[in-house]
Image (cartoon, rainbow, N blue to C red):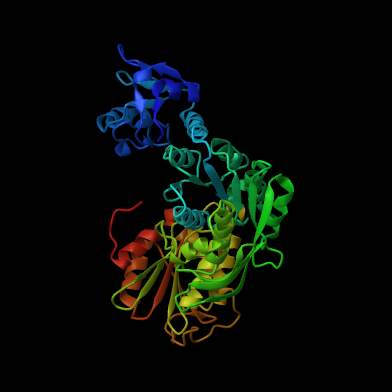
Amino acid sequence: MIALTLAEVARATGGRLEVPSGVRPDAVVVDGPVVTDSREAGPGSLYVARLGEHADGHDFVAGAVERGAVAALVSRPVEGVPCVVVDDTELAFGALAREVVARVPGLAVVGITGSSGKTSTKDLLGTVLAGAGPTVAPVGSYNSEIGVPLTVCRVTSGTRFLVVEMGARGIGHVAHLARVAPPRVGVVLNVGTAHVGEFGSRAAIATAKAELVAALPADGVAVLNADDPVVRDMAAVTTARVVLVGEAEDAQVRAGDVELDAGGRPTFTVHAPQGTRVVRLGLVGRHHVGNALAVLAVATELGMPFEEVCAALESARPVSRWRMEVVERADGVTLVNDAYNANPDSMRAALAALERMGQGRRTWAVLGTMLELGDESEVLHAQVGADVVAHGVDELVVVGEAAAALAAGARDAFDHPATSGRSGVPTPDLPDVGGTRVRTVPDADAAHDLLDTELRPGDVVLFKSSRDAGLRLLGDRLAGQREDLT
């Protein structure tokens, strides 16, 4: 982080200084990482004490100091520790991040939002921009009121590009994040049904996502998905210049001739104002075409040469874990672990990739619940179950009672059962539905036992669910990756 004295932290956050006797606030310098987990503190750190549902961060201030933290941002003083006391540490943390951005003249801030694909796109953009200058991008899915300031506070005086992933669980959330890290370029990928249970409707989700482009300055750039009518219409709420990306004929940055290889990796021809070129991605899934177009638009707007951006897109590989993470086991089984998050749109994208990867092979979809879908949850799960059948998946394993509607949707997809799957592998011992054998298991352990017994060389297995369903760890277990990863 940019070095700030404790007095400067207090001014930025509007907080009150509380320091031990004999300590001068302007002599306490925060020049290490800003952290909310005391275990991540190091020399020069500022520890932000949060009040959570299950823990009070103030109880861990001493531990942060032991690891090198020089001060804490708190809502009540901690004896013997230099502190800045504020009413709300979350809001104050955002104000501190805003101060960091203000201290780096010329910093190009790019905000990314959408119902799905945010993390993959920010990873891709971060990789590409790093070729042009020092870049800070979020770790994992740091896209919340805490995650964004954690990312911003990694900025130094030499940082040229800051990529900010902006998530939302309600109206006003993206607007708040845009105040913390004011973007010059904003990207809206799509508007789907993720978190519809919290928003109440897709229209409300669109309103929330549009807050990003509404926050752009008049000399900024809004990169909008031309293939999503709801996103396209956001051009009306911004004064920034609009760049449309997608496969639509009027998109300024357009993909044509999209094809997938046997591994599900897309090749396409990109048509942009700077030129035309065939691009071959190393990422799995057709949905990455749209992500790559958005990245191309942003990177060229920020001054990177067209050819250089295309080459960087081709060399990029997955960064964040459990996003279409492909593992080839020694026995010939292919595991596709995409179980960090799930909503109906991302489920369909993953199933499409599975279908392509599984040509001539037996395919498995191991699916768990999609969270935060509200009153529409059962219907949306059933629709995804029907999609499993439509994509010709041979084996559907539904994990957990909460996901039971997936199985019901698959079974309802056809009036008459078939006797074999798309691969031609007979499965007569259990009920088939349109070529898809449907089974339910109570938990991840039961799913592991089933797969461990029945997988054979050549099979392709997709793991997809919301994070809390635990299927990402099941995928690791079957891949032989048993690290304690969260």
Does residue 20 lie above or below 334 as drawn?
above
Q: Name the residue furthest right.
A: 236
Q: 77 or 10, which is in the foreground?
A: 10
Q: Nearer the viewer, residue 467 or 20?
A: 20
Q: Is residue 375 above or below residue 18?
A: below
Q: Quadrant for residue 305, please give it.
A: bottom right
Question: Which residue corresponds to the image point at 36% horizontal and 51% vertical from the top-left?
Answer: 486
Q: Where is residue 34 in the image (x, y as percent from the top left)?
A: 38, 35
Q: Along the line of sight, which residue is nearer the eye, 227 or 167?
A: 227
Q: Relative to residue 454, is residue 301 drawn left or right?
A: right
Quadrant housing residue 335: bottom left
The reply to whether residue 437 is in sight is no
The structure residue drawn at horizontal position 33% and vertical position 62%, both measured from the top left corner, is 476
Q: Residue at x 35, y 37 (%)?
A: 37
Q: Is residue 147 visible?
A: yes
Quarter of the picture containing the N terminus is: top left
Rendering coords of residue 14 (x, y %): 50, 21
Would residue 472 appear left or right of 404 to someone viewing this image? left
Q: Residue at x 57, y 70 (%)?
A: 277
Say whether residue 162 is left or right of residue 210.
left
